[in-house]
Image (tube, rainbow, N blue to C red):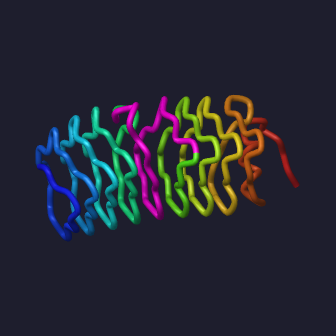
């Protein structure tokens, strides 16, 4: 599939093989990409709004200047994307059972999103924006969260022993999640 400068609304791509696609400047609204195969595709300057992106294959895919807004994202292993060409933004997304590892998502916005059982492993998340984001059973392991913002975020559990949190911003009462590993009793 080669498309550019279009708006695509309410299309169902469930199970479609879109390997090698060239997609540029496209806005997808209310589309279903469940089990869609984007193997080694180029998705550039595009936006996904209110889309279902579940168990979608992005292996080797270039995701450059791609925005996900109010999308449901389930079972995605972001570590398999083309790690030389990517720039993503997540706005008010629900991200479930996904893995994000060994990538540099510094300055990436995840504002007002919801994460459930998502693993952030060996990530550079410097100045990332997690403001007003909710976390449920998420793991941060060996991540650099320098100057990241967790203002208004809830439910996170981040160990400052195995993650770098220098200059990161947190708000009460959820900043207590930084102490969880230490088994401290607060009264």
- Residue 91 within the segment the image draws in magenta: yes
Residue 14 sits above or below residue 84 on the image: below
Residue 146 spot, x, y in % from top left: 70, 40
- Left or right position of 12 against 49: left
- Left or right position of 7 against 141: left
Q: Residue at (31%, 49%) from the top-left corner?
A: 44
The quadrant of the rendering that contains the C terminus is bottom right
Residue 103 spot, x, y in % from top left: 48, 33
- Left or right position of 102 against 41: right
Q: Please tell me which residue lies in front, 56 or 18.
A: 18
Residue 3 spot, x, y in % from top left: 16, 55
In the image, which residues are magenta? 81-106
Q: Residue at (71%, 45%) from the top-left corner?
A: 147
As drawn, the residue found furthest toward the right would be 187
User: In the rendered image, which quarter is residue 142 located in?
Assistant: top right
Residue 127 spot, x, y in % from top left: 64, 47
- Residue 97 within the segment the image draws in magenta: yes
- Left or right position of 179 against 141: right
Q: How many numbered callouts?
A: 0
User: In the rendered image, which quarter is residue 126 located in?
Assistant: top right
Q: Residue at (34%, 33%) from the top-left corner?
A: 82
Q: Please tell me which residue lies in front, 15 or 181.
A: 15
User: In the rendered image, which quarter is residue 129 located in?
Assistant: bottom right
Q: Residue at (14%, 56%) from the top-left corner?
A: 13
């Amino acid at each position: 599939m080669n498309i550019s400068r279009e708006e695509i609304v309410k299309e169902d791509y469930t199970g479609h093989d879109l390997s090698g696609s060239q997609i540029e400047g496209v806005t997808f609204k209310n589309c279903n990409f469940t089990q869609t195969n984007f193997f080694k595709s180029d998705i550039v300057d595009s936006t996904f709004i209110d889309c279902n992106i579940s168990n979608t294959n992005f292996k080797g895919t270039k995701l450059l200047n791609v925005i996900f807004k109010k999308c449901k994202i389930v079972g995605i292993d972001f570590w398999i994307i083309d790690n030389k060409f990517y720039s993503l933004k997540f706005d008010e997304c629900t991200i479930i059972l996904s893995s994000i590892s060994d990538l540099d998502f510094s300055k990436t916005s995840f504002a007002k999103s919801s994460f459930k059982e998502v693993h952030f492993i060996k990530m550079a998340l410097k100045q990332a924006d997690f403001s007003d984001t909710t976390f449920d059973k998420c793991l941060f392991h060996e991540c650099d969260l320098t100057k990241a913002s967790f203002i208004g975020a809830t439910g996170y559990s981040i160990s400052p022993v195995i993650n770098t949190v220098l200059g990161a911003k947190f708000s009460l009462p959820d900043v207590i999640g930084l102490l969880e590993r230490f088994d401290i009793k607060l009264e």
